[in-house]
Amino acid sequence: MSMQNIVESQFVKEMCEITQVMYRRNWDERNGGNITLLLTEKEVAPYTDLTDIKRTIPVDFDAKALAGKYFLVTGSGKYFKNVEKDPEHNLGLIRVSEQGNGVELLWGLADGSVPTSELPSHFQSHIARLSVDPENRVIMHCHATHLLAMTFTHSLDEKELTRKLWKLCTECIVVFPEGVSTIPWIVPGTNEIGEATSEKMKETRLVVWPYHGIYGAGQTMDETFGLIETVEKAAEVYTHVQAQGGMKAEISDEQLQQLADRFGVEPRPGYLD
Ligand code: 13P
Ligand code: ZN
């Protein structure tokens, strides 16, 4: 059976498009940011010989819960700037090994490179999201500028931060009614930050990493990008508001409740007065 060109697949094209958009937003300087997209065997089969494992790359955490699953991933040290012009060197198609202690490379990472160093956070977050939403497909990390800045100037208390973001843009409570989570500062790429992030991912699709960036999760690339885009917009507005002399008004709790009622969303319990 002759294979179709994977670079022409909908999933590689979408990954190219989104990484380029994120780069242009200035959220992914140098190699900053990483994305993992869960794919079905049916989706990948037309594009690659599933028995032709190019390399097996060990992972030092337990990925057994994802054994046999396929992911399109960004490479470690790779620049979002370059994904679109050279997907084969900047992306990889991997399958988690049966034992869950490695990933089998089926396509890409052509110069011998490896998947993102944030694979522990991504895989543990996929496991956590799938446990609460079987349709979750995407984990996305980036260094969204205004939100990153806000972690230096605003309380990182989850309720306080969520309420502030909700009150900065009318759409926020509709887009992320469950709010945002925060974790302590932890060294990136470690299993420890993966555990902290994934624990929060059971509650919220957005997890803020102080002084670093954000993690988002969703069923589609658009949903996940849209979540990050919306929270980053609120943080950008906050930046302007502070520069203009500080908040002299805000969306009230009552108005937030009206929005929730109108759009049929359930705000995080206990977050509205
Ligand atoms: P990678 O290049 O390994 O994906 O790491 C980038 C990053 O943002 C780390 O948090
Ligand atoms: Zn990062």
Image (spheres, rainbow, N blue to C red):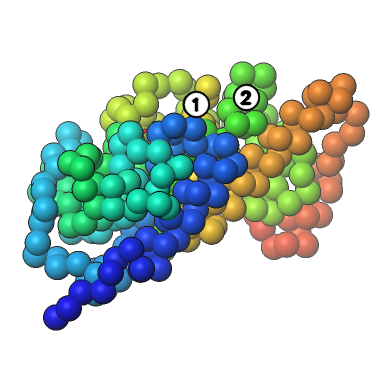
SS of the residue at dot 2?
Answer: helix
Answer with the quarter of the image where residue 158 lies: top right
Q: Quadrant of the N terminus?
A: bottom left
Residue at far bottom of view? 1
Q: Judge by depth and name the residue closer to the eye, 162 or 17.
A: 17
- Residue 2 seen in this snapshot: yes
Kind of residue at badge 2: Ala
Is residue 166 found left or right of 74 in the rendered image? Answer: right
Is residue 11 found left or right of 178 in the rendered image? Answer: left
Is residue 42 found left or right of 14 in the rendered image? Answer: left
CB under 8 Å between discs 2 and 1: no
Between marks 2 and 1, how big is the CA–CA gap? 9 Å
Residue with the mark numbered 1: 212
247 shown above or below 132: above
Q: Which residue is at a point 60% across and 31% down the rendered structure image?
A: 145
Residue 151 point in image, percent of width and height: 60, 24
Residue with the mark numbered 2: 149
Answer with the quarter of the image where residue 248 lies: top right
Q: Which residue is at a point 28% across and 69% down the rendered structure image?
A: 5
Residue at far front of view? 85
Answer with the quarter of the image where residue 137 lies: bottom left
The reply to whether the residue tagged 2 has its Cβ within 8 angstroms of ligand 2 is: no
What number of labels is visible?
2
Q: In which quarter of the image is the C terminus?
A: top right
Which mark, by number, is residue 167?
none
Kind of residue at badge 1: His
Residue 104 point in image, percent of width and height: 15, 51
SS of the residue at dot 1?
Answer: loop
27 shown above or below 245: below
Residue 228 point in image, percent of width and height: 57, 45
